[in-house]
Amino acid sequence: MDIEKGKYWDVAWNPMVGCSKVSAGCRNCWAEKMARRMQGIAQRNLDQFMHRDFDGTAKYFGTVNEKGWTGYVRLEEDEIDKPLKWRKPRIVATCWMGDMFHYNGDALDVYRVLDSMERFGRPFDDWGNRWLGSDGFVKPHTFLVLTKRPERMREIVGAWLAGYAHENKRAEIDHIWFGVSVEDQKSADERLPHLQALKGVRPNMNTWVSVEPMLGSVVLYEYLDGIGQVVCGGETGPGSRPLVPVREFGLRMQCLGMRVPYFFKSWGGGKKDRRVDGVTWDDLAWV
Ligand code: SF4
């Protein structure tokens, strides 16, 4: 993890890919641009080497075209067990090349991703090996889930947990952080009540909020109770919209007041220095 550069996860894992734009925060979607690049690489592999896939790029076929996301969302079978290969516990950005709770994704595919994450929360992996952190305690991977469609996350995760309860089992989810992305007050008011409702199903569930790109002021007091982490950041890439410092200040003060860990990722717009008045805000609950 390269915290100095504002990176708060170790590795990306994308068993489900694909999306379509849902709100103002999606306008300069980074994942969409990356998916187009990947699809271009996959097409070259196919043209030059008559080979479907050298590097996992072929999974983006169909998810993007020259106009951007097509709305096609799919599961890549080969990726499902990938975290098993990582012997050291990692912080995993999960399905950030799209939205795993997009309505075009098959709920059964989402269950498979959830099941896969759940497995890594158990003390033993499939070969009976114990997950051990450097402190000698059992330590699984940590998965960071993020969506702009929390109403579907609430529905699917709620049903998935109920499925375990139905079999008299308890899903292990202490290592999974369920997150919602918002960009302004309107999106916060629409989305965060669903995160709160999901938390009602399992009160000690880890939840977080990403305010990135921050496009407007947000007052989150009524939603922050029980939230384990807030991340804030500006927009990057061509055409990026500026992050207004006073808005960041307002959000930071709310988090400090409510004792919610606050991580400031970056100002965006190509600015490398991520300090605020000379200091960085690197409080991360999952580290
Ligand atoms: S929801 Fe996320 S991945 Fe999908 S278009 Fe919006 S920003 Fe991109």
Image: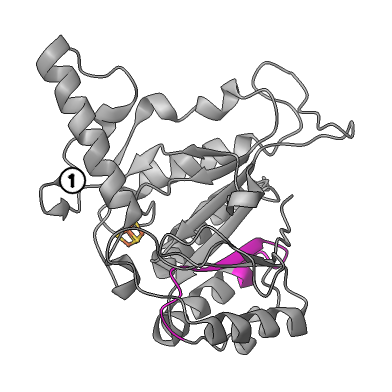
Secondary structure, mark 1, is strand
Is 18 magenta? The answer is no
Residue 50, can we see it?
Answer: no
Residue situated in front as seen by the camera: 243 or 278: 278
Residue at the disc numbered 1 = 64
Residue 278 location, x and y as percent?
70, 70
The image shows residue 201 at horizontal and vertical percentages of 62, 67
Q: Is residue 52 above or below residue 150?
A: above
Q: Residue at x 67, y 61 (%)?
A: 205
Front-most of residues 277 and 63: 277
Q: Residues within 10 Å of mark 1 (few under 14, many from 20)?
A: many
Q: Quadrant of the N terminus?
A: top right
Towards the viewer: 275 or 137: 275
| Magenta stretch contains residue 208 | yes
The answer to whether 72 appears left or right of 226 in the picture is left
Q: Quadrant of residue 29?
A: bottom left
Disc 1 Cβ-to-ligand 1 distance below 8 Å: no
Compared with 242, 140 (above or below) is above
Residue range corresponding to the magenta coloring: 199-216
Residue placed furthest toward the right: 136
* Residue ranking furthest to the top: 49
Residue at point 40%, 86% (across, down): 186
Give the percent coordinates (x, y) of residue 60: 25, 37
- For the question of whether residue 283 can be seen, the reply is yes
Number of numbered tags placed on the structure image: 1
Looking at the image, is 9 positioned above or below residue 123?
below
Q: Residue at x 27, y 32 (%)?
A: 59
Q: Is residue 130 left or right of residue 273?
A: right
Q: Residue at x 18, y 45 (%)?
A: 64
Q: Nearer the viewer, residue 87 or 43?
A: 43
View quadrant of ligand 1: bottom left
Image x and y of residue 125, in percent = 68, 24
